[in-house]
Amino acid sequence: MLLAFLVYAIITAQYGSIWRESLFAYYNYLADALLHGQLYLRNMPIRRLDLSLYQGRYYLYWGPLPAVLLLPLIAMFGLHFSDIFFTLCVGAGNVALIALLLRRACQKGVISLAPAQRGLLVLFFAFGTVHVMLAPYGRIWFTSQLIAFACVALAYLATLTQRGWPAFALTGLALAGALLTRNNLVLTGIWPACYLIYQHWPTRWLRLIGYAIVGVLPIAVGVTLLGVYNWLRFGSIFDNGIAHHLMELSLVHEYQHYGAFNLHYLPTNLFYQYIAYPFPIQDTTFHGGSLFLLSPVFFAVFWGAVTGRPRWSIWALISTIILVNIPILLVMGTGWPEFGPRYTLDFTVPLLLLAAMGVRRWPTWLLALLTAISIVSYVIGTLMLGYNIAQ
């Protein structure tokens, strides 16, 4: 965690103080509004891109949990508290969570790795995946993804650490947090649900049903809170504000014809998430990049899918990845500006577990080589993205 924070801080320090505020620290403004008892922004940020304008008031269409987490910080340090520093801390914490998760997964027999392999996978995640691109720069899009990722990692960690009703309750609570940040991430709960049911299958039926209710209850409360939040702002439980947002002008034409989610976007998203290679740096570099070419360690997921055991766990991981990926592939826009496929962070926890199953039989030198290639690619790309953002 400390190493990750240091590296992320050095990257962002190339473009200014780590205590600075980004131009898109919208969660600060929502937290400020909440502190004053309202859901629309009380103060206006310099930039208003992607804010939702409804009846003359500005709202956020993103889930509200990050703003709630920021409440004490905004109350103590004011509206212009550094979202960059906050995001750095969340990103570093995510690295610690992954280190703990991989260790616990080994202890529980979900994966089988030597300590050196596990350490390389932690380094790979920290500096050789799209996570390193999101951690240094603040901005509401990046902050929301990192907090949602933390919730997912906590859900998986609770699943592997606890037993009985605490396991179900804590997993459900963490997934509710993911839901309240990025709605589709509630689907990452497929593998934890399967694992918990498998582990508690010998339990009497009535007790198992009770456990399931305990796990589902926080998610149901989260869905209810989102519905109320939407109704209070826009008069409908199904309206999160995305229809009112001030989108990038280049997206307006397609949105008017196809909406926010449509099969029309599938070819573009497939290309920029799985095929495009962003080197050499060019105009289209910051529209995405191939998950596997930029992070070649992830090629191990194919070995994991074929050789991993038990098979129910493999299919649960694959199903989780596919279902979380569906709305990502159908969404308008690729996530620009970015380096790499930033939306794939949403399913990186199950993807990393599947990759861990695949690298088990790899020689350590091969894993180290692919980790090094991933790190070099992403550090260069992240620095270039920072330069692009700073312009």
Image (cartoon, rainbow, N blue to C red):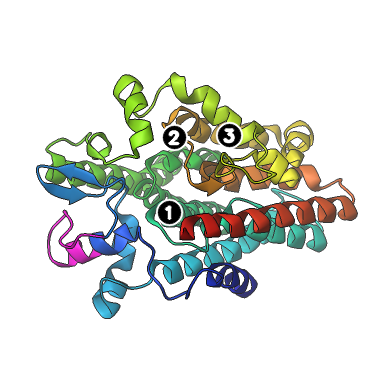
Quadrant hosting residue 308: top right
Q: Is residue 38 magenta?
A: yes
User: What range of the chain is rendered magenta?
Assistant: 31-45
The answer to which of 278 and 84 lies nearer the viewer is 278
Res 272 label: 3
At which x and y percent is residue 196? 54, 45
Q: Amino acid at mark 3?
A: Tyr
Residue drawn at 33 percent across, 26 percent down: 253
Residue drawn at 41 percent across, 49 percent down: 178
- Distance from disc 1 to disc 3, alpha carbons, whole Å, reads 30 Å
Look at the picture and state if 78 lies above or below 286.
below
Res 365 label: none
Q: Check disc 3: other Cα within 10 Å, few if <14, some if 14-19, many if 20+.
A: many
Mark sitting earlier along the chain (1/2): 1
Looking at the rendered structure, the secondary structure element under dot 1 is helix
At which x and y percent is residue 27? 31, 59
Q: Along the horizontal axis of the image, is 381 left or right of 229?
A: right
Q: Which residue is mark 1?
A: 174
Q: Along the horizontal axis of the image, is 56 left or right of 161?
A: left
Question: Do labels 1 and 2 touch, CB within 8 Å?
Answer: no
Nearer the viewer's eye, disc 1 or disc 2? 2
At which x and y percent is residue 213? 36, 43
Q: Is residue 257 in view from this perspective? A: yes
The answer to which of 269 and 178 lies nearer the viewer is 269
Magenta region's main secondary structure?
Answer: loop
Q: Which residue is mark 2?
A: 333
